[in-house]
Image: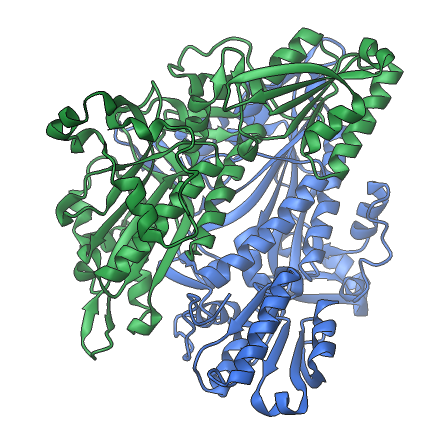
Chain colours: A blue, B green
Amino acid sequence: MRLSVYFLPTLKETPSEASIVSHRLMLRSGMIRQSSAGIYSWLPLGLRVLKKIERIVREEQDRAGAQEVLMPTIQPADLWRESGRYDAYGPEMLRIKDRHDRDMLYGPTNEELITEILRGSVKSYKDLPKNLYHIQWKFRDEVRPRFGIMRGREFLMKDAYSFDLDYEGAKRSYNKMFVAYLRTFERMGLKAIPMKADSGPIGGDLSHEFVILADTGESEVACHKDFLDNDWLKDVDIDGGLQPTVDAFTEKYAATDGERDAAKEKELGGDLVTARGIEVGHIFYFGTKYSEAMNCRVMGPDGGEAALEMGSYGIGVSRLVGAVIEAFHDDDGIIWPESVAPFKVGLINLKVGDAECDKSCENIYAMLQDHGVEVLYDDREERAGAKFADMDLIGLPWQLVVGPRGLKQGVVEVKFSDHKANTRAKEELPLEAALKRIMV
Amino acid sequence: MRLSVYFLPTLKETPSEASIVSHRLMLRSGMIRQSSAGIYSWLPLGLRVLKKIERIVREEQDRAGAQEVLMPTIQPADLWRESGRYDAYGPEMLRIKDRHDRDMLYGPTNEELITEILRGSVKSYKDLPKNLYHIQWKFRDEVRPRFGIMRGREFLMKDAYSFDLDYEGAKRSYNKMFVAYLRTFERMGLKAIPMKADSGPIGGDLSHEFVILADTGESEVACHKDFLDNDWLKDVDIDGGLQPTVDAFTEKYAATDGERDAAKEKELGGDLVTARGIEVGHIFYFGTKYSEAMNCRVMGPDGGEAALEMGSYGIGVSRLVGAVIEAFHDDDGIIWPESVAPFKVGLINLKVGDAECDKSCENIYAMLQDHGVEVLYDDREERAGAKFADMDLIGLPWQLVVGPRGLKQGVVEVKFSDHKANTRAKEELPLEAALKRIMV
C-alpha cells in the first residue's frame, strides 16, 4: 500500500479524552475514530489488525473442532424470557422496540439464541458433541464507557457454545477450549494467564478468565510468580492429552479479583505476584442452566431424554487490539508482534523525486509484494522527520529506509522493532542483505 | 469436513413459511435458521457461501482502489439530524434510546457517518480521491419481511463512498465502481444487468441498479434483448479505459420499474425484453448533498474551499446468496457455481464400515485436502438414497461416489453439476481419472 493514497489520518497531538496508552496510540495512529461514546469506527490500519486477530482466533477455534456460525445482532426478547434473563439483565442490555412494538434487544451474549438453534436441530446423543462459535458485534450499554475500544459499548466478540450429553463430555469440551485459548493468545505474543474465576450458581472449578497483566488493567489479580516466566508455554505438550496440559496451567495459584484466597496467598509468601489485569477471555461451564429452562434435550443411549450440558467460551476480539498495544509499546509508538502487525514492512523513501531513490524503492516495493510480504510504502513528499515519526508511531516490525546518501554507498537502513525486548534497533546493510534479513 | 460431525441440520419437508425457491432451499439445506421475522442465523454451510461472496466483493473493491474500513452498527441520531434525514427517514429506521436516553439508531446506510469521518481527516484536494467501503450488518425494519434473507430486516451490505474534488473526479470514481460491479457479479456466475435507476433530487445519468432477471424478482424491469446474450461480457476490455466499457453497457436500453420509457420500448419492438428483476447492487452519484449539509470541505488547488463530490455504491452481500440460488437450482436442489460453492467436492461413502470403501474414501479425502480442495465427506451410516438426496440438495459442483461394486471394477462415480447448463451429469471413471477431472 502506498501511503500517498492510503487513508491514514494520524494525529500529532495526544487527544485529551484518552487516558490510557492504547486508546491514545490508536487515535494518534489513525486506527480508530469515535462516533459516539464507547462506539468506534475502524479505519483501514486498525481494521487490518482487528482482522489478523480475528483470523488467529478463528483458526484456533477451527483447529479445536468448533464450527463457525453467525447469529444476528438483534434478538427477540421472548427467547430471553424463556431463560428468565430478560428481566434479570441490567441496564447494560440495549432494549429495542420494533415498528410492530415487539420487544427486541441487541445481543450482549448468545446463550439463548444458540440453545434455540440446537433444540430445533439435535435429536440424539449421536449428534453430540457440538461446539458452535461466531464472531459477531455485541452491545453492552456501559454506564461510563472508557479506555477506547477496551471498554466500548459496541465490541467484537468470539463466543463459542459447547453441547454435550454429560459432565465428562462437557469437561472434554472445556479442556479443548482451554488449550485453544492458550494457543490463541500465545500466537499474538501475549501471556494470558488462566485464573480461577467466578463460576456462578453452578459452582465447581470450570471457570477461568484469561488475564494479561498491565498497569492499566481493570482489576487487581494475583498469581504464582512462575506464571511470569518467559518460557512458560515451552514445556507443555500442547498437542498431547489435554488434561495434563490443563492441570499444568491450573495447579498453581492464579485468581481474579473476586476469587482471591487470603490464606493461600499468605502461604505463597515471596512467590506471590499481585498486579492489575486485563481480561481477554473467559471460559465457563454452566451445566443445564439454559437447556433445562429452554427444553433443549436429546435422546440418550439408554432411550431416556437428557438436557444438554453446556459451556460458553468468550474472547474479546476488538479488546485484544488494545490489550496487545498495552503490552507492546514505547514512547514513540506501538511495537506490533508480527502475527498481528497491520503490515510487516514499512518502506521509507527519504527523497521522493530523486530518480535513484524512487527507482530503488519501486523495485523493493514490487519485489516484497511479489514475495507475499505486506508493505506500507511511504512515498509522500514529507520531511524525513515526519516520516520516521509516523512509522515509529504505527509500529511495524521492520522499517527499510532508502536515501540518496546510503544508495551511493550501496546500503539501506534496516530498523527492527522487537516487541519482546521492547527495543527498536537499526543498522545499515547492503540492500540484498537487508531484504534477506526481512524475508526470513 | 466430515458430515458425521458437521452441523448440517437438513430438512426433508418443505417449510410452509417459504414462498420462493431460494428461501425453501436455504432452510431445507440447513444454511440458515430464522430467529425472528426477517432475522436469520447463518449455520455453517450458509456461512461458508456468505463468506465466499463477501471475499469476491472485497477483492474487487480492493482492486478498484477502494479501502476497507468498518463503521459500527449503532449510530448517533445527531449525525442524521445534521443531514436532515433523521426526520425524513420512515419507520424502516430502527430507532433506539440508550440508557442515558440519547437517541441512537441501527444504521440502514452510512452516508452521514462516513462524511463525519472524512470531514475530520481530509483537509486538502491532495488527500483526494478517496473511496472507503465497509461490509457490515444493516437493519431496515421492513413492515412485512419475506423471501428469507432476500428481504430480511438484518442484512449484510457492502457500501462504498467516494469523495472527489469535482464532478469529473466523481465520474471517474463512479466508472470504477461500475466496472468493479460487473466483475464482481460475473465472478459469482451471475448476469447482473446495469439498469438506469432513480437518481433522486440530483438528476443526471449517474444512477444504476444491477439487476438479475428471475421469476421471483420484486419488480418488473425492461431491457434490450442483447443483455441476455450469453457472451455479453466477452467482448469488453474490462481492464482498458473505463468510459468505453461503461458506455458499452449503458448505450442499450435497460430500465428499472420507475424509469421505464414507453416511447423507447415501443421503438425497440421485438428487441425488448420485460421480466421480473432482483436488485443486487446500486451505484449512485449524489454530488454535494451530504458534504454541504455536514460541512465536509477541502482546500482546492486555487486556495478556495470546496464541498466534496460524493457517490455511494451498495451491494447486497447476504441477498446475493439468495439471488445465486434463484438463478441456479433444479428440482433436486441448489447448483452452486464453483466460485461461491460451500465446498468444491462432496465425497460419498456408499458403505461405511466396509474396509475397502472406508480406506479408499479416507485416502481420497486426505489427498484432496492436501491439494487444497474443499471436501465435504459423507461418512455417515445412512441409506445411499438419503446421501444422494442430501448431496443434490446442497448442490456442490462435484460429487464422488465410492461404493463396493465400483471399487471391485476399479471405478468410482463422478457427478458434475453445471450451473450454466442447469444439468447434473454422471459417469463412471477410474479413480485416477476422476480425481484428475475434479482437480483441473
Position of A419 relative to B37 (above/below): below
Asked whether, in this view, residue B318 is left or right of residue A370, the answer is left
Q: How many marks?
A: 0
Which residue lies at the image location 83% right of the left edge and 41% below the top edge?
A: A243
Which residue lies at the image location 17% right of the left edge and 61% below the top edge?
A: B292
Give whichever of B263, B290 is nearer the camera: B263
Look at the image and tell me in which quarter the C terminus of chain B lies: top right
| Residue A244, percent from left and from top | 86, 45
Give whichever of A218, B404 is nearer the camera: B404
Asked whether, in this view, residue B428 is left or right of residue B194, the answer is right
Give whichever of A410, A190 is nearer the camera: A410
| Residue A160, percent from left and from top | 61, 38
Give whichever of A89, B313 is nearer the camera: B313
Tell me, yes or no, if residue A399 can be seen here.
Answer: yes
| Residue B160, percent from left and from top | 36, 51
**Residue reaching furthest right?**
B355
Look at the image and tell me in which quarter the N terminus of chain B lies: top right
**Residue reaching furthest left?**
B263
Asked whether, in this view, residue B334 is left or right of residue A312, the answer is left
Asked whether, in this view, residue A268 is left or right of residue B172, the answer is right
Corner quadrant of residue A382: bottom left
Tell me, yes or no, if residue B71 can be seen here.
Answer: no
Position of A379 relative to B103 (above/below): below
| Residue A384, percent from left and from top | 50, 86
